Amino acid sequence: IPMGLVVKEWSNPGMLGFLSSNPDLFNELTWGNFLLKNLLPVSLGNIVGGSLFVGIAYWFIYSSKWNKLTNE
């Protein structure tokens, strides 16, 4: 996406037609859309999903070890 933004900002309009069959698609390619519609949701999803999956994995691993150690 950042490379697409750079191409959009630095190229002439004829080059956009060469790069895509529909150059109007480049109109929605902005830094604001990138940050709000892509980077923010992806980052939040990675933070929440990663913390849940890693937390659950650690809980499962260490709770089973703890139960084995305390029951012996």
Image: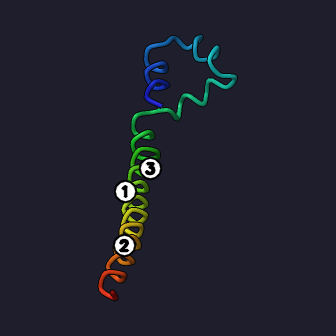
Picture residue at 62% right of the left edge, 23% below the top: 23
Residue at (60%, 31%) from the top-left corner?
25
**Pick the front one: 7 or 57:** 57
Task: Name the foreground residue: 71 vs 35.
Answer: 71
Q: Position of residue 44 (x, y in %)?
A: 39, 55
Number of numbered discs on residues: 3
Q: Which residue is mark 2?
A: 59
The location of residue 20, given as percent across then percent down, is 65, 22
Which mark sits nearer the N-terminus, 3 or 1? 3
The residue to which callout 1 is attached is 47
User: What residue is drawn where x is 43% and y is 60%?
Assistant: 49
In the rendered image, which quarter is residue 14 located in? top right
Q: Amino acid at mark 3?
A: Val
The earlier-in-sequence mark between 2 and 3 is 3
The 10 Å Cα crowd at callout 1, few under 14, some 14 to 19, many 20 or more, is few
Look at 35% across and 83% down and name the residue there. 67
Within 10 Å of disc 2 (Cα), the crowding (few <14, some 14-19, many 20+) is few
Q: Are marks 3 and 1 in contact (CB under 8 Å)?
A: no
Earlier along the polypeptide chain: callout 2 or callout 1? 1
- Amino acid carrying label 1: it is Ile
Which residue is tagged 3? 42
Q: Give the spatial CA distance, label 2 vs label 3.
A: 25 Å
3 vs 1, front mark: 1
Mark whose residue sits in front, 2 or 1? 2
